[in-house]
Image: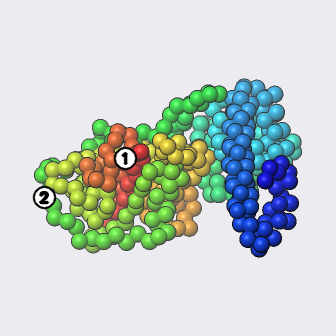
Amino acid sequence: MEETEENLAPLVWGQAEQCAARGDTAFVRRLGSQLADRRAAALEQARDHQRQLAHVIRVLALTPGRDSLTQLLRLLEDKPHAGTHPFIASLLAEHQQVPDLVATVFDRSEWRELDELRACLFHELLLRGADTETRGPLRDWTLERPGWHPLAWLPTHRRDFEAGATFPRRSVRGSAGGASSRLPTRGRMDPPTPRSVPPSALRDVATVDVYETIVAAPQAGDWGACGAWVFQLDQAIAPDQVPALLPTLPMACVDGLGPTDRFEIAACPMEEIWCLLFETASMGGVYGSRVHGAFGRLWAWRSMAGLSGAAADASAPEVERQARHSTWFHFEAGAEWFHNEIGSDYGIAALSPDRCRIAVLAATDTD
């Protein structure tokens, strides 16, 4: 069977069944073998085309000036599946001048099919400090943007706790940057060792929905593993009681932790927690994917909402109020669940405003 590629289809649809019916199953097997080889070659060719296309888009996005911007937008409008808009928006925000971006990308009369790019670029620019409130295309976008889009839930101006967001550094052929989860040295509240507090009788009450909300950031960033737990306390506790309580809770991330094993914790301002969640989602894990700035902002807010105990249908201002009145902690532990590699493990705990609820997020990202 030495058929050219264009003649395989007639063999598949015209002869395979007849050959099998008369007992020539070896012919059918050889036909399948040829198709499998051609499929593998086609997939590799498609991957090669994808790598080349990604490089071309990167060159256009990273070449400053309105001419390269216009050519990129023309490519994206003519070929809607040429590239992923969250990634392209991130590149543009890093390398292009804001006036050029505002004058070109946000011209909806010229580029009618690029609302997804505009939605992502708006938040990329906002997080980098662009003025979104003065009258102009950026403010107009907040009135024109599709209400159904997930990013429409987010505030249309940068909140003060978002001002410390960090971003990757990219060139045409390389990149640098990643989430840093190091425990801060200030605000330390490490409980004394040996820890003698008995295991807590509290039980995890996190529902599936609450769990998924809390782990939104590490799941979006494709970290290696993550977990979430929620505990409803019998009575209000003071923030300085949290460090001693956490190692006693029934959580996989502290399971097996001995009385002298490492457990380090620091009280943190809300902005440090938000930045950690943002970097987790936007920059992704070491070997995983990432969602970049716009959606990184969204998933950081979602995780913060779940940790602080905001209602499932809470608006962004409601989430912010709940989070601002919560008490936040960053911790690390020598338990087996963590791999204890620098920058690859962290735990976050939030004590609710009424001090009767503790929510915990643990994340690890190792090979």
Kind of residue indicated by mark 2: Ser
Instruction: Return the disc, 1 or 2, that comes first in the chain's sequence.
Output: 2
Residue 269, given in percent of the width and then of the height, sits at: 39, 46
Few, some or many C-alpha atoms within 10 Å of disc 1 (few <14, some 14-19, many ≥20)? many
Say left or right for 296 vs 49.
left
Q: Give the numbered dot on residue 345.
A: 1
240 and 297: which is toward the camera: 297
Rounded to the nearest whole Å, what is the CA distance between mark 1 and mark 2?
25 Å
Residue annotated with mark 2 = 196
Residue 50, given in percent of the width and then of the height, sits at: 70, 41
State the residue at coordinates (23%, 71%). Answer: 201
State the residue at coordinates (49%, 43%). Answer: 287
Instruction: Confirm whether residue 161 shows in the render.
Output: no
158 and 307: which is toward the camera: 307
Asked if 321 appears above or below 166 in the picture, the reply is below
Q: How many marks?
A: 2
Few, some or many C-alpha atoms within 10 Å of disc 2 (few <14, some 14-19, many ≥20)? few
93 and 240: which is toward the camera: 93
Q: Give the numbered dot on residue 185.
A: none
Say left or right for 31 vs 169.
right
- Looking at the image, which residue sits at the far top? 64
- In front: mark 1 or mark 2? 1
Asked if 179 appears above or below 298 in the picture, the reply is above
Under tag 2, what secondary structure?
Answer: loop
Picture quadrant of residue 14 = bottom right
